[in-house]
C-alpha cells in the first residue's frame, strides 16, 4: 500500500504534469499564454481589499468533471503538506513505543502509551483494546479538541474515555493521543510559532499532523490491528486533524470529522492555521479530498457547523457523486452547542459499524455502563518522568531545522528528487501561479498589468521600443527605476522597457488590513511568553493562513510580468537591484519560460534574520531558500 511519503512525492510529480488545474482556483502551473482579454485591471488591488480570515464565508467547491477534481485534489493535498512542512515527508525514525500501566475490565483494557515521533519528542496517549478473543481488529485514531483535559476530558459535551471504551467494546483498537502541549505531551506549549520558525514551516499544525501520521504508524504496527482497516474520528481541533490526516495519508479508510467542516469558520487556533494552508481553499474542499472513501460529517446547531446539512454536505456529496459514490458520505446534526456528546458519538459508532463487517450488533452501538478510571490512572506521566533525551521547544525547532537542511541538501544534489519537484514545491510555498491570461491596460506611458479573474493590479511605466521588452524593477518603484543608468542605456539602444511597481512598492503602496508585516508590529512585554509571541508572529487573525505575504505577492507580480513580456515563447530579460533581485530570482525559478537575470546589489541571505528583513515568506527555507531558487533560475 502506498504510504504518505510516497504519495506526497507522487502527488507533486503529478501536479507538475498538469497543464491546466483550474487556474483561477488553485494556482498550479499552466501554459504561458499572455492572452488579451475584455477584462480590465481593477482600480484597487484585491490583495489589499479582499482579506480572508478564519470567519470569512468562503465559496463552496464546484466541479463538473472527475478529471478536474482529481487534478485539484493533487494540488490541494500537496498544499497541505507544503504548508505543514512535510514536503517531502521527513524521515521516520523508530517510535520506541512504551505501552504500560494496563487497566483491565471485563470486555476491554486501557493502556498508557508514549511514542517518540521525533528523536527526543514524545507523544502521550491511551490505547483502548477489546477483549473479545479475535486476532485482528479495525483500528481507530482519536485526536482531541481544545477541552481543558484533552484526551481525558470527561463531561457531557465531550468524553474521550467514553469514546475509547465504547469503541473497544464494539471491537476496535483505539489510540487516543494528545495535542501538543496537553496532558502528557508537555515538552512544548500548545501555541508557538516565531517568525524564524515560520520560515522553516515549524509550527503546531505541522507538528500535530506529523504526530497523527506517526500515530497511524503505531496503530498499524500492533499485532491485534488490521492495518487495512484504519479510521479516524475527532471533534473540534481533533476534527481538523481528522480531515487533514484523511486527506494526506492513504491508509485511512473511514473517517468522521466532528463539528469542524464548515464554510463559515475555519478553526481559531494556531494548531489549525499554518501559513499557506487555506490560500484559495477551505475546510470543505480539504475534507472532500477523502472522497470516495466513507466519511460521516457530524454537525451541531449551536456552532459554526450549523449550515452543514444544507450547505457544506451537499457540496461535498457532489464531489462524491463524480465517483458515483454519493452514498459513501453522510451527515447528522445534533441540536446542541459545540460538542462530541453521546448522541454524536453514537452516530459515529453506527457509521463505523457499517464500514466494518463483523463489528457488534446494532444493540451494542450505544454507550452503557461507562466506568472512567481516575485521570491520574490514565496519564502516561503520572508518577513518571519523561525520558532523559526529551527536548524543549528550542531544541525541537533546531532538530526540525537540521533535518530539513539535510533533506534539502539531498534534494539539491539530486539524491531524492528532480528539478520539477523542487520547482513545484517552491511554487506552492510562494502560492504563485503562472497565469494563462495577463490583462494589460495602457494609456500613453502608463501601464497596468493583472491576472484575469484575480483582481490584482501591477502598475508601471511603458517605454516604447523594439523587440521583447526588458523588465526593470527597483524596490523603490518605477519612478526610481526610470531615473537609473540601466533604463537610460536600454532606451538609448531602442529597447522596449517595462518598469514595474510590484506589490506594496512605489505607486502600488496601499493599506492592507490585517497584515502586521505592513504596519506597526504589536508591542510585546519583555516577559511575553511563547504563546503571546506566537500570536504576534502569526498575525491577526491568522493572516498568512489565507493570504500571501508581501514578498510572495511581489514574486507573483514579477511572474505575471514575465508572462506578459514573453508573448508566449520569447526569452525575457530582467534588470533588477536590491531586494527586487530576490523577487526576480524566485520568479525566474518558478517561471515556465527562460529568464535572463541582470542582478545588482543582491542582499546576502545567510541567516534567518536576513530572510525576515529581505524576503519574508513562510516556509521559504523549508523549500530550500535562495540556494534552490538560484539553481532553478539558471535553466529549465
Image (cartoon, rainbow, N blue to C red):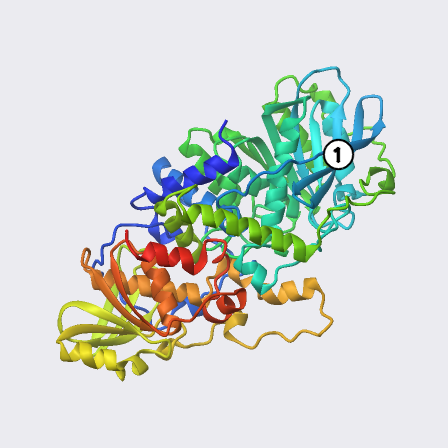
Residue 488 spot, x, y in % from top left: 20, 81
Circle 1: element type: strand
In the image, is residue 402 above or below residue 112? below
The foreground one among 225 and 264 is 225
The foreground one among 576 and 125 is 576
Residue located 30% across and 62% down the image: 560
Q: Is residue 368 left or right of residue 122?
A: right
Q: Is residue 610 left or right of residue 346?
A: left
Residue beneath disc 1: 98
In the image, is residue 286 above or below residue 613? above
Residue 102 spot, x, y in % from top left: 83, 29
Q: Name the outermost residue toward the bottom.
A: 483
The foreground one among 568 and 91 is 91
Task: Answer yes or no: is residue 289 visible.
Answer: yes
Residue 319 spot, x, y in % from top left: 44, 38
Residue 210 spot, x, y in % from top left: 60, 43
The crowd level at tag 1 (other Cα within 10 Å; few <14, some 14-19, many 20+) is some
Q: Is residue 423 left or right of residue 320?
A: left
In the image, is residue 24 above or below residue 94? below
In the image, is residue 462 above or below residue 316? below
Residue located 61% across and 33% down the image: 217
Task: Answer yes or no: is residue 79 visible.
Answer: no
Classify residue 561 by image quadrant: bottom left
Amino acid at each position: 500500500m502506498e504510504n504518505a511519503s510516497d504519495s506526497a512525492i507522487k502527488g507533486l510529480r503529478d501536479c507538475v504534469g498538469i497543464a491546466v488545474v483550474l487556474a483561477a482556483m488553485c494556482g498550479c502551473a499552466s501554459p504561458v499564454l499572455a492572452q488579451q482579454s475584455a477584462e480590465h485591471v481593477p482600480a484597487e488591488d484585491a490583495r489589499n481589499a479582499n482579506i480572508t480570515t478564519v470567519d470569512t464565508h468562503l465559496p463552496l467547491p464546484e466541479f463538473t468533471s472527475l478529471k478536474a477534481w482529481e487534478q485539484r485534489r493533487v494540488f490541494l493535498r500537496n498544499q497541505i503538506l507544503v504548508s505543514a512542512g512535510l514536503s517531502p515527508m521527513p524521515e521516520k525514525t523508530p517510535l520506541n513505543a512504551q505501552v504500560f500501566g494496563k487497566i483491565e475490565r471485563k470486555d476491554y483494557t486501557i493502556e498508557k502509551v508514549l511514542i517518540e515521533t521525533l528523536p527526543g519528542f514524545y507523544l502521550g496517549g491511551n490505547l483502548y483494546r477489546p477483549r473479545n478473543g479475535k486476532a485482528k481488529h479495525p483500528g481507530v485514531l482519536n485526536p482531541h479538541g481544545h477541552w481543558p483535559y484533552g484526551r481525558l476530558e470527561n463531561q457531557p459535551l465531550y468524553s474521550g474515555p467514553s469514546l475509547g471504551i465504547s469503541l473497544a467494546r464494539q471491537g476496535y483498537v483505539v489510540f487516543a493521543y494528545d495535542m501538543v502541549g496537553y496532558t502528557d505531551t508537555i515538552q512544548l506549549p500548545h501555541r508557538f510559532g516565531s517568525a524564524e520558525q515560520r520560515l522553516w514551516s515549524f509550527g503546531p499544525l505541522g507538528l500535530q499532523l506529523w504526530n497523527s501520521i506517526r500515530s497511524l504508524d503505531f496503530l498499524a504496527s500492533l499485532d491485534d490491528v488490521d492495518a487495512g482497516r484504519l479510521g479516524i474520528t475527532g471533534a473540534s481541533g481533533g476534527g481538523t486533524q481528522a480531515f487533514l490526516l484523511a486527506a494526506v495519508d492513504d491508509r485511512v479508510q473511514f473517517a468522521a470529522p466532528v463539528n469542524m467542516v464548515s464554510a463559515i469558520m475555519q478553526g481559531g487556533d494556531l494548531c489549525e492555521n499554518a501559513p499557506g494552508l487555506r490560500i484559495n481553499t477551505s475546510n470543505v474542499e480539504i475534507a472532500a479530498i477523502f472522497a470516495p472513501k466513507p466519511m460521516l460529517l457530524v454537525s451541531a446547531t449551536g456552532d459554526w457547523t450549523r449550515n452543514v446539512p444544507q450547505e457544506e454536505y451537499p457540496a461535498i456529496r457532489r464531489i462524491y457523486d463524480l465517483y458515483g459514490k454519493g452514498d459513501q458520505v453522510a451527515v447528522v446534526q445534533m441540536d446542541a452547542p459545540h460538542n462530541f456528546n453521546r448522541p454524536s458519538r453514537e452516530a459515529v459508532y453506527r457509521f463505523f459499524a457499517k464500514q466494518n463487517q463483523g463489528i457488534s450488533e446494532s444493540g451494542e452501538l450505544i454507550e452503557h455502563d461507562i466506568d472512567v478510571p481516575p485521570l491520574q490512572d490514565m496519564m502516561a506521566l503520572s508518577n513518571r518522568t519523561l525520558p532523559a533525551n526529551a527536548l524543549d521547544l528550542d531544541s525541537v525547532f533546531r532538530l526540525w531545522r537540521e533535518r530539513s537542511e539535510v533533506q534539502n541538501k539531498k534534494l539539491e544534489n539530486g539524491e531524492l528528487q528532480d528539478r520539477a519537484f523542487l520547482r513545484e514545491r517552491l511554487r506552492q510555498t510562494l502560492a504563485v501561479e503562472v497565469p494563462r491570461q495577463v490583462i494589460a491596460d495602457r494609456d500613453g506611458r502608463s501601464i497596468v498589468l493583472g491576472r484575469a479573474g484575480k483582481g490584482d493590479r501591477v502598475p508601471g511605466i511603458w517605454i516604447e521600443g523594439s523587440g521583447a521588452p526588458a523588465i526593470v524593477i527597483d524596490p523603490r518603484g518605477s519612478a526610481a527605476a526610470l531615473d537609473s543608468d540601466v533604463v537610460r542605456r536600454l532606451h538609448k539602444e531602442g529597447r522596449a522597457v517595462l518598469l514595474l511597481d510590484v506589490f506594496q512598492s512605489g505607486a502600488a503602496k496601499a493599506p492592507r488590513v490585517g497584515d502586521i508585516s505592513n504596519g506597526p508590529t504589536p508591542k510585546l512585554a519583555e516577559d511575553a511568553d511563547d504563546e503571546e509571541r506566537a500570536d504576534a508572529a502569526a498575525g491577526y487573525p491568522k493572516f498568512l493562513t489565507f493570504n500571501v505575504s508581501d514578498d510572495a505577492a511581489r514574486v507573483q507580480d514579477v511572474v505575471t510580468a514575465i508572462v506578459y513580456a514573453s508573448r508566449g515563447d520569447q526569452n525575457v530579460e530582467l534588470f533588477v537591484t536590491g531586494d527586487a533581485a530576490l523577487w526576480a530570482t524566485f520568479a525566474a525559478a518558478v517561471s515556465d519560460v527562460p529568464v535572463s537575470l541582470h542582478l545588482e546589489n543582491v542582499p546576502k541571505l545567510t541567516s534567518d534574520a536576513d530572510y525576515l528583513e529581505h524576503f519574508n515568506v513562510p516556509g521559504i527555507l523549508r523549500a530550500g531558500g535562495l540556494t534552490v531558487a538560484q539553481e532553478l533560475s539558471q535553466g529549465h
